[in-house]
Amino acid sequence: MARSPHILVIEDDRETGALIARYLRDNACRPTLAPDGRGLDEMITTQRIDLVVLDLMLPGEDGLSLCRRLRSRSHVPIIMLTAKGQDIDRIVGLEMGADDYLTKPFNPRELLARIRAVLRRAGTAALTPFETAARTLTFEGWTIDRGMRELRGPDGTRIAVTGAEFDLLQILCERPGRVLSRSQLVELTQGRAAGAFERSIDILISRLRRKIEHDPHHPRMIKTIRSGGYMFTPTVAAS
């Protein structure tokens, strides 16, 4: 069964927040409510969040400031909630890195559609297009056969990889160009909360680099992102 996307809703109006949470929960999402920036800070540092729904009109630190601060430390997708007539705030929010916006009042069904669309674009939905259909993924001559769970080099040679190495490489290939934190990689590959196991990701990355990189000490395909995690840089084709 696909993992339900974890949606953090930053909304100080209890009635609106409860309405959003109830609708998302009824539609296979896992919502968490927070009323302000303090709740955002606590959740983003302790749990894996797939997307943030962020109201711009908040007590204390406003939504624009939170958007800018969140984007400086995370690539988590953000959908802003704005009131009618807040065109300037909406434009500024998008310039600060928000992925989409929705004007209040809104139909919860439209919010759900926006969430699903942003998750698909971001590659962080529980199931990506690659995951639902493609048997093989190819990049720079390398081939991942997901049915046979085999990795083959550009010359067609089968490369010996462990199950954990295969799972990690597959996850990276399914999300090219995305920065994935160690905790995200742990959850996506092992299905457990981050913590003591994050170090295992570094070990697996090192092993994969020795097998697929021309120069493992200066990796070109699996990049380390400072204070972020890892990013798979090649273009990936699915078939």
Image: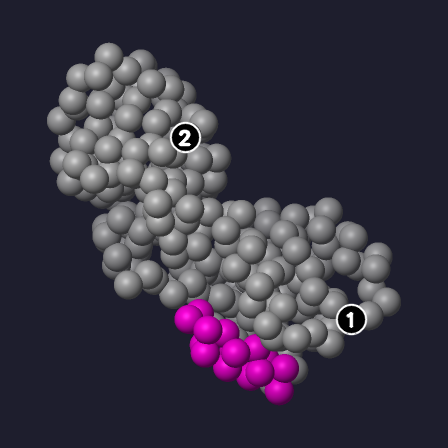
Is residue 26 on the magenta stretch?
yes
* x and y, in percent, of residue 93 in the image: 72, 54
Distance from disc 1 to disc 2, alpha carbons, whole Å, reads 41 Å
Secondary element at image label 2:
strand
Vertical order, 53 against 157 (above or below): below
Residue 32: where, in percent of width, then height? 47, 73
Write down the quadrant of residue 81 in the picture: bottom right
- Residue at image x 37%, y 19%? 140
Location of residue 102 by image quarter: bottom right
Question: Residue 237 has which mark?
Answer: 2
Q: Where is residue 211 in the image (x, y as percent from the top left)?
A: 22, 22
Residue 83 is labelled as 1
User: Depth check: 199 or 222 in front?
Assistant: 222
Which residue is at a point 60% across and 61% down the rendered structure image? 114
Residue extending farthest to the bottom is 15
Verify whether residue 65 appears in magenta.
Answer: no
Q: Range of the magenta residues?
A: 15-30
